[in-house]
Image: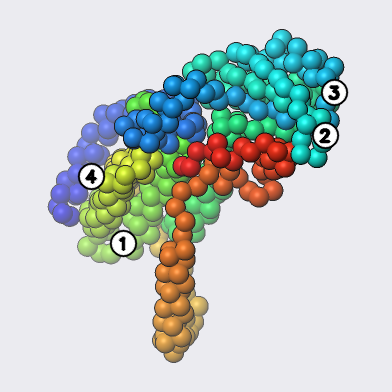
Amino acid sequence: MERFFRDFATALRRHRALTLLLFVGLTLVSGVAALQSRVDNSLAVWQAADDPHWQQYQQFVARYRIIDPLILYLPGLDLLSQEEIADALQAETSADRLSSLAIRSLSGQQVGLFFVVPRADSSPAALATLLAEVEGVLGQHKVAYHLGGVWYLTTLLDQLSARSTQTLFPVVLVILIVGSIVLGRSWRNVVLVLLCGVLPALQITGVMALCGVRLNMILLALPPCTMILGIAHAIHLVSKQPDPDHADGVSLFARVAPPSLLSGLTIMIGFFSLVFSSYLPIRQLGRWGAVAGALSLATSLVVLGLFFEPAPCRAIPLPQGYVGFMARHRLSFAGLFLVLIVLSGVGLSRLQTGSLILDFFQDTAQVRHHYQEIENGGLGLTPFEIDL
């Protein structure tokens, strides 16, 4: 294998211009496609089209013409104010139609109840726009309100996914930059390591967008995961100590690439094993996780094969007595490890399968407060939630 990778790196450097042109072209196409990527946690994304339970649900909805409205629960609203708000909602929002009721809650309070129905086949972006329009109208009238409904929850789930990704990705990137600086031997190699992480993360996002894959909360974890895998492959090489037999970049690359290839293939096989799951999002994670593993490995091999050069070693010494301390307390560490295994087994035995959409939100989230207030008023919304 060393001879193969030595020839591979030599061929890359001999045709550096062509290799860079192809690689940069792929990355640019992926980057443009990544800009079109959208977050979508609607119910259809979580279900397989041929799933019998999902088909029965769709048939039930079609047969009885069940609508999926945005539910507005306005406590303490008189009839005159209800008519004003209804007129404003019809005039200032993009809703397809609107209906309203005046009811009394379990506490005897008069309540205005609105059902805002979006246009058929509205996209997640259109639903988010409608939700913002409705909240704007209610804010103008300065009334207390609570919201509910299935697409309302999935729209909030889209927003939560986007915010989480926008927060998580920079944090992961900063941690990886710090680790790369500590483990890298030169700024040149630090830049190469980071490129080996950022480029495949961009590529997997673009490839999924080109294939029309809608990103739910599970698939959104792939870009950061791909970045971590690419950087791990690269650090494995740049932290290797040169020796007289492998003093140049090509020889050292040829020595380290085989174990990196084995690691990458193991990761791809691990992801691919998920395609045998009976649940669609897990199958998608397995399929695209294998692609992400392949992109992270290929990017690392190409970038480092082209540009890697050994740098002086920056040793990271372990604290004195570390090995001796571990040896003297090996039974204690083994016992602690065994306790953790037992606790993990107990946790797995108590693990519950399935989750309501509300379970994705924190206990203090506003959406949970909305649902609690509506249900306390006598309207049971939770049975309408779809168990993911």
Q: Quadrant of residue 192?
A: top left
x 23%, y 39%: residue: 12
Q: Left or right: 127 with respect to 346?
A: right
Q: Position of residue 44 (x, y in %)?
A: 43, 30
- Residue 78: give its label: 3
Nearer the camera: disc 4 or disc 1: 4
Q: Residues within 10 Å of mark 4 (few under 14, many from 20)?
A: many
Label 3 and label 4: CA atoms lie apart by: 77 Å
- Residue 9: give its label: 4
Residue 25 visible in this rendered orientation of the protein? yes
Q: Amino acid at mark 1?
A: Pro
Task: Identify which residue, 90 or 172, lies in the foreground.
Answer: 90
**Quick one: SS at disc 4?**
helix
Q: Quadrant of residue 163?
A: top right
Nearer the camera: disc 4 or disc 2: 2
Q: Is the residue 178 above or below the residue 199 in the image? A: below
Give the residue at mark 2: 109
Task: Identify which residue, 212 or 9, lies in the foreground.
Answer: 212
Q: Position of residue 119 (x, y in %)?
A: 55, 15
Q: Amino acid at mark 2?
A: Gln
Image quadrant in which the N terminus is located: bottom left
Say which label, 3 or 4, has the lower sequence index. 4
Q: Is the residue 187 above or below the residue 245 in the image? A: above
x 72%, y 16%: residue: 89
